[in-house]
Image (spheres, rainbow, N blue to C red):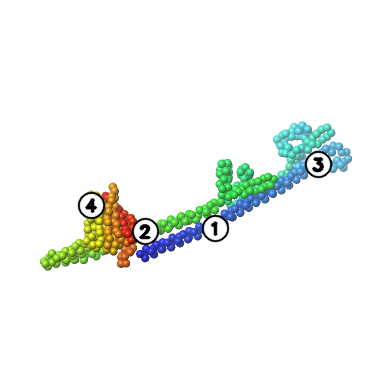
Amino acid sequence: MDIYKRRSNLKLVLLAIAVTIGLLTTLYTNYLTNKIASEEKRKARLWAEAITSKAHLVRYTNDLFERLALDERKKVDIWSQATKLIIKVEDGDVLTFFSQILTGNTDIPVILADDNGKLIEFRNFDLKGDKTQLNISDSQFTAFTAYPPIIVTFGTKRNFIYYKDSNLFRELKKTLNDIITSFISEVVINTASAPVIMTNALQVPVAFGNIDSADLKDPARVKELITSMQHKHEPITVDLGEGGTKHIYYDDSMVLKQLRIFPYIQLAIFSLFLVFSYFAFSTSRAAEQNMVWVGMAKETAHQLGTPISSIGAWIDYLKENVPELAGNSAIAEMEHDVERLTLVADRFSKIGSVPQLQPENVRLTLSRNIDYMRKRASADVYFSLDCPDAAWTFAINNQLFDWVLENLYKNALDAMQGAGSIATSVTADANTVYIDVTDSGCGITRVNYQTIFEPGFSTKRRGWGLGLSLTKRIVESYHSGKIYVKHSEIGKGTTFRIEVPRKVK
């Protein structure tokens, strides 16, 4: 009993250690997961703040360019006034002054056209074609119509001065746009390690990071991504000023997703390892027990063989040489004991080998064993047999199955302490015979329903705990049947059930 208590306690300790390791691993992984999730959320907010800063920069840049554009228009307006006045001025110095104004414009492209749009003069612009044949509606002058023209009046005539941004202005604008673009691609988007999408109020993406651009070409896929992100994290709203509001949606990074499921994978692997180890240990232990059983049985049969043969020979010798002992009851009992010992040795010799199963009559087999036990039991023990059909048969090896019944009846007698009843009842179906052996003994606790069949388990002070273990082995391994505790109640008794096939398999 102590062996199984220690083994059960060891299993509980190992299970507790495994659970503790699993819990600690899960807790630590969750700690790392939450820490990474907080970091990714911080990066997403940093991404949003960077977008906001970019918006402020854009607004400031737009203001700057508006001032530059206004300044260039003022220059063009001065140029137009000089063009208008140079015709009216007769003073040489003033004329020189206005001429310097006209020739001083070296960077702003301008075109002078009449009321019909016909080109009169141009400056700081590479003209394609004859200016006398060109009109302001020509495609090469499209950029000059971005700003409203300045009207120059000469008496009753009206001319129009068209202009566009200067080369310096365009280069500055391009440079600042390149800086902004670089700012977004190199700083803003790369700040977030998790997938992020920035959308306008209509949920149309305007910027993204760590997402395959092909996914954003499909509106349905975009909607799916945004919905999924929104369910996982509250979107971050970015105010770009002047009514420009954007929303930033973000998801967990692949590292974080993998880290979230890692403890479950680890626990699964750990559990599989424990299960595999348990079955490997059980299989190894069962194989070891099998070798012990077979070796012990074969050795026992071998050791019994010589003295049994010797005793049989001495009995024959006494009967031949001492005629008056031939009818002696002691000699007869000795012969019965030798036959019994021979049967026991023969049983042991069959352990480890494949027994020959034969159809046997159920009632005759049970009656024979009950009669044998009745002669060796107390007169206060009542035996009964209920087998409705005398023609029922089952596939057994007589010698081994008699051993099974003998062990069950002996355990029942020990449980009743010399007084009580042992009832054997039989039922059957098309394939199986069911034998119930019920005693009125002390009973078995439910926790020991399986343990009683383990080698070494015994409730008797001097028991070896091998009888029921051997019984289970004979029924299950050699007869392809089952044996188990069907019912037991402390102080009232126990019912063992044996299930045996009716036909040889």
| Relative side of 302 to 267, left or right | left
Q: Give whichever of discs 3 and 2 has the lower sequence position.
A: 3
Residue indicated by mark 1: 31
Q: Is residue 348 above or below residue 358?
A: below
Q: Measured along the vertical axis of the image, is residue 205 above or below residue 454?
A: above
Mark 3 to mark 1 CA distance (whole Å): 70 Å
Q: Which comes sooner in the sequence, label 2 or label 1?
A: 1
Q: Residue at x 25, y 53 (%)?
A: 386
**470 or 296: nearer the eye?**
470
Q: Is residue 120 visible?
A: no
**Residue at the left extreme, as displayed:** 323
Name the amino acid type tagged 2.
Arg
Residue under label 3, please give it: 78
**Eye-nearest disc, 1 or 4:** 4
The mark nearer the N terminus, 3 or 1, is 1
The residue that mark 4 highlights is 361
In the structure shown, which secondary structural element does the residue marked by tag 1 occupy? helix
- Amino acid type of disc 1? Tyr
Locate the N terminus by quadrant.
Answer: bottom left
**Marks 3 and 2 close (CB-CB < 8 Å):** no
Label 2 vs label 1: CA separation?
A: 43 Å
Please give the residue where the numbered disc 2 appears in the rendered image: 446
Q: 350 left or right of 17?
A: left
Q: Position of residue 334 (x, y in %)?
A: 18, 65
User: Going from the N terminus, do you reach mark 4 or mark 2 first?
Assistant: 4
Between the C-alphas of marks 3 and 2, the distance is 110 Å
Residue 271 seen in render: yes
| Label 4: how many Cα within 10 Å (few below 14, some 14–19, many 20+) | some
Q: Nearer the viewer, residue 443 or 482?
A: 443
Picture coordinates of residue 422, whole percent (x, y) = 27, 58
Mark whose residue sits in front, 2 or 1: 2
